[in-house]
Image (cartoon, rainbow, N blue to C red):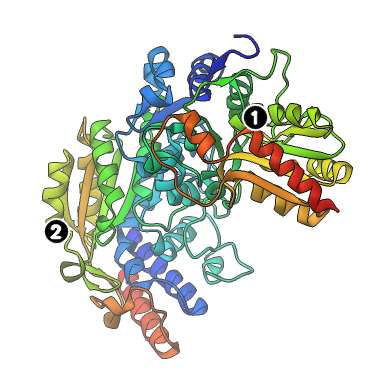
Amino acid sequence: MAIGDKKATRESYGIALAELGEKYDILVMDADLSKSTKTDTFKKKFPERFINTGIAEGNMMATAAGIASTGRVVFASSFAMFAAGRAFEQVRNSIAYPKLNVKIGATHAGISVGEDGASHQCLEDIGIMRTIPNMVIINPADHVEAMAAVEAAILHDGPVYLRFGRLPVPQIFGDDYKFELGKGVTIAEGSDATIVATGLMVPYAIEARELLLKEGIDAGVINIHTIKPIDTELLTAAAQKTGAIVTAEEHNIIGGLGGAVAEALSETCPVPVMRVGTRDVFGRSGKPYELMELYGLTAENIAAKVKAAIALKK
Amino acid sequence: MNRETAIHAYKARKHALTGIYNAQSGHPGGSLSIADILAVLYFEVMNIDPKNPKMPDRDRFVLSKGHCAPALYGILAERGFFPAEDVATLRRTDSYMQGHPDMKGIPGIDMSTGSLGQGISAANGMALAGKLAGKDYRVYTILGDGELEEGQVWEAAMFAAHYKLDNLTAFVDNNGLQIDGNIADVMNSNPIDKKFEAFNWNVITIDAHDYDAILDAVNKAKAVKGKPTVIIAKSVKGKGVSFMENQAAWHGAAPKQEQFEQAIAELDAKIAELEA
């Protein structure tokens, strides 16, 4: 793969598991969605280390907790809707409370799931997971970052929620990319505002910067892959330098990256924060890119919000 | 019958009630109904070391009905994991004796539980991990009969049979009562034996207060290959304290001073009888 080539981060998840399965004695669980979550890539290579729980996500999470209690690192995979939604309480009580080494591989997050519609478009998972103590949340932007995130999750002591997408996304980072858990990535410095994006919105943020430059507006771009713990230091520095922040995520503007950034900056450097994301509505069936357009997940909308944020500065 | 085991069971009942009385909060009924099972497991069955609670190859215990933690703490204290005086600090802000089992803070607790239906899944995970690692430790869990109303229990039951977890033994504390009343009235989980049979489990039914029967059932379970065993233990909620027995009202209520004194007197009398 080269920069610009497209791959869905769920694919990266499966590839990473299969590769890292050689290096680490991990176990991988799935709830009858291994062909979709791509854990079947691992299953084919390490069938003796793959556990299918059938369609029972809550049971999978608590079973994973029991496995992790014996000292193993175990991945538990399903769609974000079921991993964070249906199994919330098992994740909270059996995994996070005892801080066990269960790594939740949640695929099919966000509106870009497309045709399956609102029932499967999870726009709440970051908010749900963010409120659980001990939980780390990573939302990678491309293949390179997703691969690195899976290994970082293995090396982290405690639960991790990994958010992956179904839609192929362009590779942004080169092979020299260094992933550091909890650290934001400055993609471009700016002086007028800073766009803080996560996941598949990162390329749109970069595109928005380019649109704005044509109008003489210099907006920086920060990629936040680790939504919790969030990189308050980097965000604060960006707020101090540029005085206006726009967040961009494929999630409800309530509780997600936008919420996390606003919460952090309200305590360190209160500046205007405008949020791009779904605006507290359910999704609907459609082609992924049509839906992104429909719900305002576009470079044009980010650019418009940057101008609005700059206007609020005055 | 092993007299020492019975004495530990009754002393554990005292520790549990003392903690609940001091906290004026907790679950005496179910704690009293599982004390005898716990005593047999911790004194006659499980390979554990109070000096090394995290011993990797130890047998494991998960209290799926986590609200009966006081009895488990009482038995762990009897077994030497921590002093009995600590159980008396149950549910206090300055104590590590949490209202429900906390594996991070309490020696001897193998899984944090309290939300019903999840402990059996965790026990499955431990049992499967043991098999995958080629270890021969065994895993024990106790479920409530009211807890069987949680759908996750049956997801877990399916899983245990599917993965042939013959290193797992689950007890159902079948006292017939839940917070809101008789299980048969609130949400009938009967017939429990037929349900587990249909889920491909080995099923044994015993008297939960017959120490020999408990040990015998555990040994029979060890001999069964290819399927998990459930021991349906017909119990008396509140067992050992006359006015608490078979009373749903004592599910989650703490005794007042006079009641506590009477309860302790009854338990002391039983201990004296066993020691005689």
Residue A29: give its label: none
Q: Chain of mark 1?
A: A
- Kind of residue at disc 2: Asn
Residue A43 x %, y %: 39, 18
Name the residue: 70% across, 25% down: A179
In this image, A62 relative to A145: left or right? left
Q: Which residue is mark 2?
A: B190
Asked whether the viewer can see residue A163, the reply is: yes
Vertical position of residue B223 compared to residue A38: above or below: below
Vertical position of residue A88 compared to residue B226: above or below: below
Vertical position of residue A197 compared to residue B216: above or below: above
Query: B230 or A228, which is in the foreground?
Result: A228
Residue B114 x %, y %: 42, 58
Q: Which of the two marks, 1 or 2, is nearer to us in this view? A: 1
Q: Mark 2: give few (<14), some (14-19) or many (20+) Cα within 10 Å.
A: few
Name the residue: 23% across, 36% down: B161
Q: Which residue is mark 1?
A: A204
